[in-house]
Image: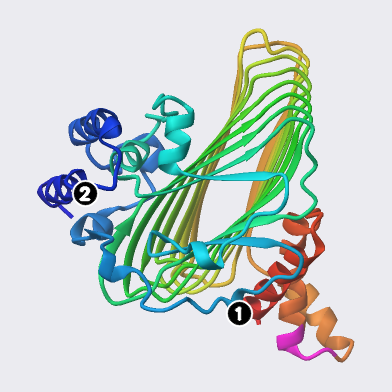
Amino acid sequence: MSLTNFQNEFQKLLDRKYFSPELHPVRKDAFSKFEAIGFPTQKWENWRFTNLSALKENHYLISEVKDAPQKTPDISNYKIEDLQTIVIYNGHFQQDISSVPEGVQLLTGSEYNELKNNQLNHSEKSPFDLLNTAFMDSGVCLIVGKNTIVGTPVRILFISDGDSSIMVNPRLHIDIESGSLLTFIEEYVGNATSLFQNEAVYITIEKNSEVEHIRIQSSSENTHHMANLHVEQFEDSQYNFYQYEDGGKFSRNNIYVDLNGENSECRINCLSLSRGTQHLDNNIVVNHNCPHTDSSQIVKSVLFDKSTGVFNGRTVVQKDAQKIVAHQSNKNLLLSKSAKMNSNPQLEIYADDVKCSHGSTTGQLDDDALFYFQSRGIPKNEAFVLLVSGFVIEVMEKIKFEPIKNYIDKKMNTWIA
């Protein structure tokens, strides 16, 4: 998709009357900066293992009214007990089948912007952040007030279907005020023939609050999925992130966490399962900006066929961030001689009283272990599933909400088998 195509689609978006004109200057500024920077190339350090040529060659159109569902979408295949769901179909909010639990305030993007006096929180950390700000089209904002324990998890279900080649740019704002707790789930599904999904999620966790954030990416095999996650934490806050992905032709996750308050903690857990010619890329940056902060990254990948993967994990410890604890672990299982994994764990430390570690391993399935199972009468296929399941289980085992944990386990075991 050339910049000319983007320019044409951008003008179409500006001409839409139902988007707030107050945001046009912000959109135009972001798009101007995107034009100046352009798409990342493999000459960029953090993109050297990720080829975007297929994305740039496609011609995507912004989602139109015709791309909305003609009837109420059937979401029974994605049913999970004991949670409430917000449904977005090809970028169109489905109000009649959406609900949020008590204690959660749901706002549209325009309502949230009015609440914030159009002082939009946006990032310029990557060209895709700029692109999202320019094209943001499906805004969902969740606000949890002070001292609120939200007992029922809330899910945003993104469904992408149809034969049109479209792009959607969801913008999510999750504001958790002090002393509160929320379990929040994103799920990406559908059978879109051709899709470019470029989401941006901004999460603010205030003092003494906790968020469990679960992300399931099972988009269609012809989806280019870009996820930009920005988390800001304050004193005594807790952020637990779990990501399961097995979908998309291409997927890149840009995760940025800023620990801005003492005793704040974040736990990042990612599992990528790929086959065919899929390319799944995780780029994680955790900034320890205060002393007495704690972070961990556990990222695992299982790769079949000619699929490829990337892990770029960076922990930055600022000068005054003494007595922090930070750990990184990247482990990868190659189940084909043609599969390829690129791993680059990094520590950037400017303080001297810290506990930091990082490590990476990439290997194949243990033939001795496989033989051991077979020698005990377990068929080879079942032994294979058991060994792969044992390798990945660590990533998701600490999810507190049992229905979603079981849901992911079922998807994972089906994929492996």
Q: Nearer the viewer, residue 299 or 410?
A: 410
Q: Residue at x 41, y 68 (%)?
A: 160
- Please say whether residue 45 is one of the residues in the magenta stretch: no
**Left or right: 297 in relation to 56:** right
Taking the spot 48% from the left edge, 74% from the top edge, the residue there is 305
Above/below status of 204 relative to 50? above
Mark identifier at residue 76: 1
- Residue 181 falls left or right of residue 415: right
Residue extending farthest to the right is 376
Start-end of magenta stretch: 378-382
What residue is disc 2 on? 16
Quadrant of the image occupied by residue 244? bottom right
Query: For residue 347, what is the image quadrant?
Result: top right
Mark 1, secondary structure of its residue: helix
Indicate the position of residue 48 as horizontal and vertical percent values: 36, 43
Regarding mark 2 in the picture, which secondary structure is present there? loop
